[in-house]
Image (tube, rainbow, N blue to C red):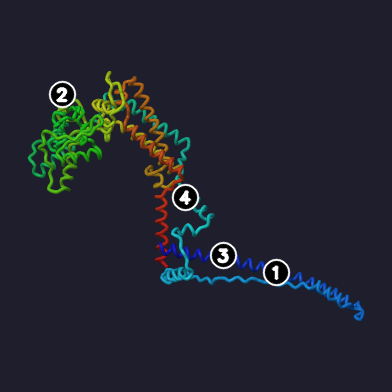
């Protein structure tokens, strides 16, 4: 690339020299032409004067001629004028045709030309190779081909997105509601129970096949949870503060909320990190009322299996995953009771980060609670991972309706290819429709929660669809980013790189064929 840049700069210098010398030659020719015309005029005038003189001489008698008068007249006709024509020296220009077979010789001639004329090449060659007009034209072309365009949704797109958001919002209002009265929650709980039972049976059969002493396979949710609890024990599964060496630290924790406050029970990257950290260090990590606490369990008999670091990390990962499966549907003791309580499951991903929000003042049954304390109360009302799955149903319906509409319209109406019509990837029209649809969904959900709660913060929070609001926030961030990029006239560098790669491949192929 460096050699190409130097070659282009030399060619540009040669072209500039040629243009300069062409202009100088043109000027010299114009000067010569001007002088020639002036001389032609002078010759014509001289011929006329000689003719007049000849006639005068023929009419005068030479004997009566006064020589002094004649000399004075001749002096008036002396019009000699020196004419100088400046010459223009042109530098000899040489050029070598570019060809792949003579690339080495061409490079040598370029370097020789640079040394001969003592050229100083620019560090930014392509900037010097183009005129201001060329730069402007290229900039306009690049912006046209690779600039971010805004959404071009028509009225029907907005109407359908609004309709989709309203339909999914009504599903949320009448079928999701809060964890205490949700119709879809029952179906979700049943599917989660079936998943836990199937997982426990799979682990049971694996253990039996590997020669472990196991008796009876799990056949209900209580036995399935119990088997997984025994199979995937961890050191951070304390239910009360009394199970930990507290010292001067304070931790308000009970069996109903210990899954929320124990960081290792979070089904996300945060939970995985603290789970493996706790298993390696023998400590337990908790988050509560704006603080993160690292405490030592009183029962510290846990030992992480594995002979190497990698083996221990893998074992820690499977312990974390298996223990989450044992807790996702509640504890074995709670699920085995006659009252058929669902128990305390695991939190929605990243929900426990609300424990860092130890501010605000909310009225909960006459007591003032911070946002962190309010989130604990909401969790205790059943706002766990299973509730999150239920809340995701109207969100999924909204996504599916809008994406299917977008795909059909792109393919059948706009006549785009099947690949271009797929409702995936980055598409500003699809993004705009999704933000409108989820905005209507969240508006419906928020109005319903406000009307039904009648000012009660706890009831309002339990009826709020957190999954829908998080999705709307994510889409809103992407939309704001797109608008900012459009305002700053930034380019789609990914598309630019793809086209550049295609062009380089084409050029390389042509060189190889030649």
The outermost residue toward the bottom is 63
User: What residue is pinned by disc 1?
Assistant: 35
Q: Contact, CB < 8 Å: mark 1 with mark 4?
A: no
Q: Residue at x 25, y 38 (%)?
A: 268
Q: Position of residue 322 (x, y in %)?
A: 18, 38
Q: Position of residue 47 (x, y in %)?
A: 80, 74
* N-terminal-most mark, 1 or 2: 1
In this rendering, would 428 be left or right of 296?
A: right
* N-terminal-most mark, 1 or 4: 1
Above-or-below relation of 495 to 196: below
- Disc 3 crowd rating (10 Å Cα; few below 14, some 14-19, many 20+) is few
- Disc 4 crowd rating (10 Å Cα; few below 14, some 14-19, many 20+) is some
Is residue 182 something one can see in this rendering?
A: no
User: What residue is pinned by disc 4?
Assistant: 145
Q: Residue at x 54, y 72 (%)?
A: 92
Nearer to us of marks 2 and 3 is: 3
Q: Secondary structure at mark 3?
A: helix
- In the image shown, does 142 or 7 lie closer to the viewer? 7
């Amino acid at each position: 690339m460096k050699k190409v840049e130097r070659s282009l700069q030399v060619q540009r210098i040669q072209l500039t020299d040629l243009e300069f010398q062409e202009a100088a030659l043109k000027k010299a020719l114009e000067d010569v032409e001007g002088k020639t015309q002036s001389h032609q005029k002078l010759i014509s005038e001289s011929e006329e004067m000689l003719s007049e003189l000849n006639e005068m001489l023929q009419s005068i008698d030479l004997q009566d001629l006064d020589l002094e008068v004649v000399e004075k007249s001749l002096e008036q006709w002396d019009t000699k004028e020196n004419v100088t024509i400046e010459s223009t020296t042109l530098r000899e220009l040489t050029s070598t045709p570019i060809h792949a077979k003579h690339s080495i010789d061409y490079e040598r001639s370029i370097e020789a030309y640079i040394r001969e004329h003592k050229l100083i090449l620019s560090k930014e060659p392509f900037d010097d190779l183009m005129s201001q007009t060329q730069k402007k034209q290229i900039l306009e072309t690049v912006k046209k081909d690779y600039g971010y365009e805004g959404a071009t949704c028509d009225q029907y797109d907005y109407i359908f997105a609004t309709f989709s958001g309203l339909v999914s919002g009504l599903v949320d209002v009448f079928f999701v509601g809060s964890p205490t009265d949700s119709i879809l929650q029952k179906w979700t709980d049943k599917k989660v129970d079936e998943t836990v039972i199937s997982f426990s049976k799979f682990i049971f059969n694996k253990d039996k096949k590997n020669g472990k002493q196991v008796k009876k396979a799990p056949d209900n949710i209580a036995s399935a949870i119990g088997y997984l609890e025994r199979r995937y024990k961890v050191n951070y599964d304390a239910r009360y503060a009394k199970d930990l060496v507290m010292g001067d630290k304070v931790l308000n924790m009970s069996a109903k909320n210990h899954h929320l406050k124990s960081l290792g029970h979070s089904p996300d990257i945060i939970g995985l990190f603290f789970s493996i950290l706790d298993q390696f260090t023998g400590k337990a990590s908790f988050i509560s009322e704006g603080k993160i606490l690292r405490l030592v369990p009183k029962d510290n008999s846990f030992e992480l299996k594995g002979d190497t670091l990698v083996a221990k990390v893998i074992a820690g990962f499977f312990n974390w995953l298996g223990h989450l499966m044992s807790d996702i549907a509640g504890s074995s003791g709670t699920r085995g009771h006659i009252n058929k309580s669902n128990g305390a499951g695991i939190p929605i991903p990243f929900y426990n980060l609300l424990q860092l929000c130890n501010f605000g003042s909310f009225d909960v049954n006459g007591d003032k609670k911070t946002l962190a304390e309010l989130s604990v109360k909401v969790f205790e009302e059943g706002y766990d991972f299973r509730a999150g799955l239920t809340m995701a149903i109207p969100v999924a319906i909204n996504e599916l309706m809008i994406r299917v509409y977008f795909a059909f319209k792109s393919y059948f109406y706009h006549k785009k290819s099947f690949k271009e019509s797929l409702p995936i990837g980055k598409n500003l029209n699809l993004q705009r429709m999704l933000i409108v649809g989820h905005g209507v969904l969240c508006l419906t959900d928020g109005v319903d929660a406000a009307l039904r709660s009648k000012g009660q913060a706890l009831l309002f929070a339990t009826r709020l669809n957190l999954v829908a609001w998080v999705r709307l926030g994510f889409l809103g961030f992407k939309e704001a980013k797109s608008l900012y990029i459009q305002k700053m006239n930034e380019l789609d560098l990914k598309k630019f790189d793809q086209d550049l790669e295609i062009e380089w491949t084409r050029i390389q192929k042509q060189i190889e064929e030649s």
